[in-house]
Amino acid sequence: MRGPRALESLLGDVARQMGFDHFALMHHVDLAPYRTGLDHMERGEMVAISDYPSAWIEEYVRRNIVADDPVLLASRHSIVGFAWDRMPDLITLTMEHRALMEDTHRAGIGDGYTVPAHIPGEAAGSCTFATRTGRALPVHNLAMAQLVGAYAFQAARTMVINARRHPAAQPPRPRLTDRQLQCTVMVGRGMTEREIARRLGISDETVKRHLKEARQVYEVSKSIELVTRALHDGQISLFDLVRD
């Protein structure tokens, strides 16, 4: 196993051979650093690999669903894998949990089997194999999913640990220009593009260009994601967003 990308490809192939459509291998932590390029694993930050629909992954990270996901909450109460229809035996499902499961179904993920990963002194984790909406679980392969999930999480965990112990030279983090930062801060304060233009004495189109280029720097599509990334990288602070 050469790295996160190789594990991602292998796990996707194995999942489909077992009769599943998707997988999600993750630590149950803030997923804000998640990137489809798996840079977070190469930096040793956390385990997070998934081939769920990209729109659902973006929404999952944006809404910080990891904190309230009933599947992850249920995994705290089991040391072996469980099908999602067993969740009521493990936790009390609230209306919010059921609504979240409905959101999951609408995103194209119908049913799943989750293998918990509990390692003392470390963040909890899990490996989930899921079917798309409308397809039943391949129940004849759940025992195999238990074995594959456990070994897959251990392989990913080892990659992250090794990356922490032997950090590779990392490319410089994206940097925004002064004007891009000004526009990003003002977006974070809730200002419109027209309001920003008036405040800075520039045209609306120039503001749009600065924000578009800033989003391109971070490879995001929404301004709120831009603000979040700039905060995470320390280019702006919460103090910048609340002062005028």
Image (spheres, rainbow, N blue to C red):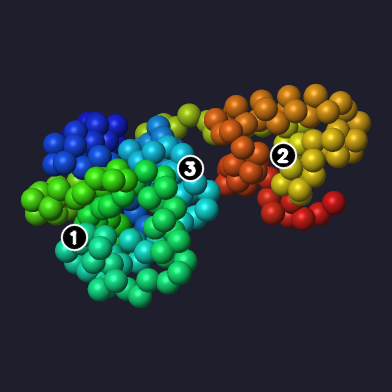
Depth order, front residue of 168/156: 156
**Dot 2: element:** helix
Amino acid under label 2? Thr
Residue appearing at x 33%, y 38% in the figure: 51
Which of the two residues, 70 or 217, is positioned nearer the viewer here? 70
Secondary structure beneath label 3: helix
Q: Which residue is mark 1?
A: 81
User: Label 3: which residue?
Assistant: 58
Mark 2 to mark 3 CA distance (whole Å) = 20 Å
Mark 2 and mark 3 lie on one chain; the one further toward the N terminus is: 3
- Position of residue 87 relative to residue 167, above or below, is below
**Please, what is the three-letter code of the amino acid marked with disc 1?**
Gly
The residue labelled by disc 2 is 184
Q: Can you say whether 58 is above or below 101 in the image? A: above
Indicate the quadrant where residue 16 lies: top left
For marks 2 and 1, the one nearer the N-term is: 1
Circle 1 crowding by C-alpha within 10 Å: few under 14, some 14–19, many from 20:
many
On screen, residue 65 versus residue 145, left or right, reads: right
| Left or right of 90 on screen, residue 107 | right
Amino acid at pointer 3? Glu
User: In the rendered view of the protein, which quadrant contains the N terminus?
Assistant: top left
Report the side of 127 relative to 45 (left or right).
Answer: left
Q: Which one is earlier in the sequence, the residue at label 1 or at label 3?
A: 3
Q: Secondary structure at mark 1?
A: loop
> x, y (%) of residue 128?
26, 51
- Tell me where residue 75 appears, x and y as whole percent: 28, 64
